[in-house]
Amino acid sequence: MSKSAPKKAPAGRPPVIRSTADFARYVGLARTTVSRVLNGQPGLRPKTVAAVQRAIEETGFTPNAYALHLKGKRTATIGICMENLLTPPAVLKVAALQRCLREHHYASLIEVLEPGGSRQVIRHFLSLRVDAVVFIGHFIEEEIAQRLRELETHDTPHLVMDQLGIPGATTVALDRRKGMHDLVGHLLGFGHTSFGLLGITGTTRSLSDRLAGIASALEARGLAFEAATRSLDSLHARGNDFEYGRALARSFTGLDRRPTAFVALNDEIAIGALHGLQEEGVRVPKEASVAGFNNQDICLMPTPRLTSIDQQIQATIEAAAGLLLTQIDGAPERRPQVRMIEPLLVARESTGPAPA
Amino acid sequence: MSKSAPKKAPAGRPPVIRSTADFARYVGLARTTVSRVLNGQPGLRPKTVAAVQRAIEETGFTPNAYALHLKGKRTATIGICMENLLTPPAVLKVAALQRCLREHHYASLIEVLEPGGSRQVIRHFLSLRVDAVVFIGHFIEEEIAQRLRELETHDTPHLVMDQLGIPGATTVALDRRKGMHDLVGHLLGFGHTSFGLLGITGTTRSLSDRLAGIASALEARGLAFEAATRSLDSLHARGNDFEYGRALARSFTGLDRRPTAFVALNDEIAIGALHGLQEEGVRVPKEASVAGFNNQDICLMPTPRLTSIDQQIQATIEAAAGLLLTQIDGAPERRPQVRMIEPLLVARESTGPAPA
DNA sequence: CTGAAAGCGCTTACAG
DNA sequence: CTGAAAGCGCTTACAG
């Protein structure tokens, strides 16, 4: 060889290699040659390639990503913003999305957004020159809309998962309207005509979609929303969802004409309500039906097991990844797209025929 | 001014700024000056600083992180490896750790480890020159030990959360032995002398620690482990934990002398067992006590609410962050440390006096 | 295959 | 304050 030899391995332990220069000296090849092997370029002797690969095994050398990308190589990195309130479905989504992106050779950076902290996170992602940014969850609309505008300034594609109604956002979201429509249809089929709503009051897009779905199912059977539904949400504060559902159900049992079917914002509230009813001596599903939303694992826990609406996470993720990758590969100026995911009703023992 | 002017804002929309050179031209200052403002160096006119800051607001310019760190600036980034099986406590930990690290101005990259995929993930982290790597969860011991050796080759500090017994690893973990000791002590105090173990059979470190805790609590009262405990784990396959707990509990009700107290691997199995007992007509806690482990939110769901062992996640995270930061700040050659976290017994209505 | 060179976007002395 | 220069670790023509 020649040159100032690198600190050769002091018996056993390989030397610390910090750059292609160190590494080239270690293998005994030129920097250029090493680089060409590393980048899989043609015209190299198999022997040379083998020597480099062996040296990588020995030293664990990884080229500095910062230098790589500075040279213009794509960062192949996608930033994911998670809602602060980490629900099990949200966690499943981010894990599935990361797996899916990895299959397409993208790394993903996950950051949990603190309230008001989105600006800082997006700037960090931009400084890392991510290829795209994904938002998973429900956020303050104006805040996210502002972030999306910033991303557009930097020509960075973005995608919103779960939250409908953000202007200019390419969005993948569950069709909650259809989910509630199907669920109420299922209960109407069992002869129920009086519905207790648990935690579904409000004016956010997610809630108004659900209410619209309930209303449309009722209307299809000639029932008026006002007459057929009842909500006591305002009677209790929402802290722990199980406790909230339990308290709501108990309040319902005190009513003169208690609804025979209950639909809830999520599985936790539904299961709380189920237990609240049982504790008051109401048998489920014989005397009342209860249904949740999201179809989490906990639906299998209570006796009876909970009927719920499945979010179809795999389909959601695949749609999101598809949209994301076509955006990155740059069909320019595509109008923001909104893709709705069809939910799936999973009927279990907590719903059944209305009492006579 | 002078030079080839950048594409000046075509009315309204600011130009796309990709480098300090673009940006300096936009502000009308020298690159050097801009850089000094960006890095908060002294000796600059307030007017200059203000102009730069205003321009940042207008353009959303962020210096290229790759160039920054190539110049030698710390990446201020920590890689977090999550276990594939995402349990709620693990999710709480990673979110809390990220928040804690952010307060110390570290960004964190989260990757979920697929089985056998740890090598690829660690190489990615190394190529990003992270300041440290954290493992959260339970992994294959030899695989992680190998990864830790690779990290050491690159002088990269590391920390293992939750999993005890990995040689050479600085570790923060819950003292599960003490947790089980306290829990069984609580039940002994209620007069129970016969214990059903749910899902606690096995030889992994986590399981043998728990068994040791149970044994030590029994011994302190002069009871022999073999005589006082019973496990039927082998009778059922562990799929969904709720179903597993339910099935185990039902098998126990078929025994001649059914235990009066049940301790479980986790809250899910305990709640499944609770429901299994109730479905067989066993009243809890009057005729049997049931306790979980982890103290998740779902402990509040069943009737009665579940007694459990809290993991003290906040304390765990603070200990982990502390160890991590001192390692990064480089007290060199510190022996690997192991810090145990004291669990907390949370007694609820699912445990009570043994039947007469 | 080698070796010298340019350049990615930044920071940091250094002379004006 | 400005401007020219060096250098971080890489890749990519280019001449040998």
Image: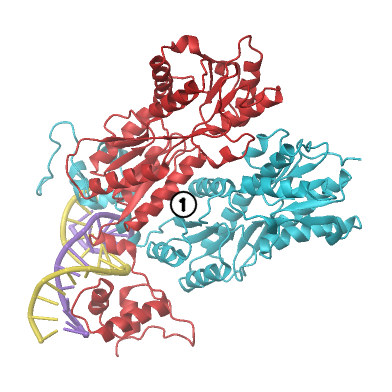
Chain colours: A red, B cyan, C purple, D yellow
* CA neighbours of label 1 inside 10 A, class few (<14), some (14 to 19), many (20+): some
**A227 left or right, relative to A278:** left
**B296 left or right, relative to A156:** right
Counting from the top left corner in percent of width and height, residue A268 is at: 57, 33
- Depth check, front residue: A32 or B232: B232
Instruction: Tell me if I can see residue B49 in this picture.
Output: no
Q: Quadrant of the C terminus of chain B?
A: top right
Which residue sits at x=63%, y=36%?
A: A302
State the image quarter where residue A240 is shown. Answer: top right
Which residue sits at x=80%, y=46%?
A: B261
Counting from the top left corner in percent of width and height, residue A103 is at: 35, 57
**A268 left or right, relative to B19:** right
- As drawn, which residue projects farthest toward the front? A356
Instruction: Tell me if I can see residue B341 in this picture.
Output: yes
Which residue sits at x=31%, y=74%?
A: A20
Which residue sits at x=60%, y=64%?
A: B170
Please say if B12 is above or below B224.
Answer: above
State the image quarter where residue B207 is shown. Answer: bottom right
Q: Which residue is mark 1?
A: B106
Please say if A44 is above or below B221.
Answer: below
State the image quarter where residue B307 is shown. Answer: top right
- Depth check, front residue: A102 or B11: A102
Q: Quadrant of the N terminus of chain B?
A: top left
Q: Chain of mark 1?
A: B
Counting from the top left corner in percent of width and height, residue A189 is at: 47, 23
- As drawn, which residue projects farthest toward the bottom? A1
Counting from the top left corner in percent of width and height, residue B254 is at: 78, 48
- Depth check, front residue: B269 or A143: B269
Tag 1: amino acid: Tyr
Q: Secondary structure at mark 1?
A: loop
